[in-house]
Amino acid sequence: MSSAARRFVLLAVCAVLALSGFSTLAQDGVTVNFYYPTAVDAPINEIIQGYADQFMAANPGITINPVYTGTYTQTRDTINTELQGGGAGPTVAVMLTTDLYSFIEEGSIVPAQQFIDQMEDADAFMADFFPALLLNSVDEEGTIWSVPFQRSTPILFYNKDLFREAGLDPETAPKNLDELIAAAQALTLPNGERWGLMVPVQGGFPIWLFQSFAIAAGRNLSDADPTNVYLNEPESLAALTDLIELGTVDGVMPAGGSVWGDTPTAFLAGQAGMIYHTTGSLTNILNNATFEVGVGFLPSGPAGEDGTGYGSPTGGGNLYVFANATPEEQAAAWQWIEFLASPEIQSDWGMKTGYIASRVSAWELDPLAARVAEFPQYGVARDQLAIAEREFTSYRAIDIQNIINSTLSSLISGSVPLADAQATLDAAQAQIDALLAEYK
């Protein structure tokens, strides 16, 4: 579908909403089927149910029906299967920000812009979100399609007790790749007894953490134009080389990386001195660590003029309203979204999970303000947003992510030698360009 055709579809959707007599007040007796992915270790289901109970007590005409749908991928597959089969599907769902263009092309969602435009305080509402978290909420025309909720960045976790034992400053996290390697070498014990570092890029989804290295090397994998993908650039090759050689040359992490779910467990067990992981794991790690936990920005690249080599993508899920719902259900869904995105709920959510509260004002409210005062680690991912860039997305995002992930996995695992990396990246880029050709 061409860009002009997509804009026509958007205008048609907007017209239908306008003709439907959309109102921001839902009618009584409405059920909102809320599909939610449970992707990290935390009492997430209980937290979500608590919010649903709180909302329903204040809105007795609306029933929130949480449906827990597994990982993000399982949730997306469930939604697509239900919608393609003529089922009801969700009224609203938390889904990856990177699914935006796929949902738009499929006609699965309606733009949040329609609801925002009818708010009395629309400008103030949007201005209170961190700008970096909105990068994946808009299309190339600037239309807002989804609202930040379960947002994150990857961050560096480190064991301050082990830093002290190794003669490292426990109050100073590595600021660039050279410092990261030096610290990891000091922390590593022989024969795999303890790794200085674990970066969970083993398996089928290395793209998110690879983006940290690519951004730090000077070129993100995508930009505001969803027809642009930069997999075979010199910066990507440099980033890939740095990531792989942490295991194969520097010997400070397992060759090929570690498994996502196993990495926090290894860190808590003292089997890794530092790890890259999502800030969404922060509460779980702090609650279960028997040592002092340090947190820092991701030091994935060479030192710049200021001595830092930071690079981080944003990540996590946004709230989407689905097109299959009736206008009354969509109105109720928007009330639920406003509730979940409110500063009060975002403050509570950030404190309980470690995800980044997406509203700036949420950080000034308890319980999050008190939590940050007691545990400054909670403020690190928020502060990292100042240098964070968009998470990878594009047209044909699912297909292109599959190409990128399989290409990176073959190189990171060593099944394709690093010497063939440029040719391998070039071949993958050619496949990507072919998929994107119709959108140019």
Image: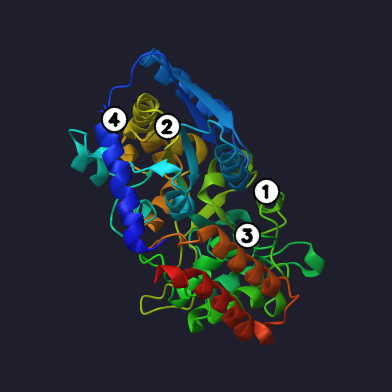
Question: Is residue 413 depicted above or below 79 in this figure?
Answer: below
Q: Label 1: which residue? A: 268
Q: Between residues 371 and 56, which one lies in front from this camera angle? A: 56
Nearer the observer: mark 4 or 3; the answer is: 4
Query: Which residue occupies 55% across, 78% down?
Result: 430
Residue 400 appears left or right of 393? right
The amino acid type, in three-letter code, at marker 4 is Ser
Residue 428 visible:
yes
Cα gap from disc 4 to disc 1, whole angstroms: 53 Å
Q: Nearer the viewer, mark 1 or mark 2?
A: 2
Residue 291 position within the rendered picture, expressed as x and y whole percent measured from the top left: 62, 47
The N terminus lies in which quarter of the figure? bottom left
In three-dimensional space, the C-alpha distance between marks 4 and 3, rounded to whole angstroms, equals: 41 Å
Q: Mark 2 sits on what residue? A: 348
* Secondary element at tag 1: helix
The amino acid on which the numbered mark 1 sits, given as a three-letter code, is: Leu
Mark 4 vs 3, N-terminal side:
4
Label located before the other in sequence (3 or 2): 3
Report the residue marked by disc 4.
20
The answer to which of marks 4 and 1 sits earlier in the sequence is 4
Query: Badge 3: how crowded within 10 Å, few (<14), some, or many (20+)?
Result: some
Residue carrying label 3: 205
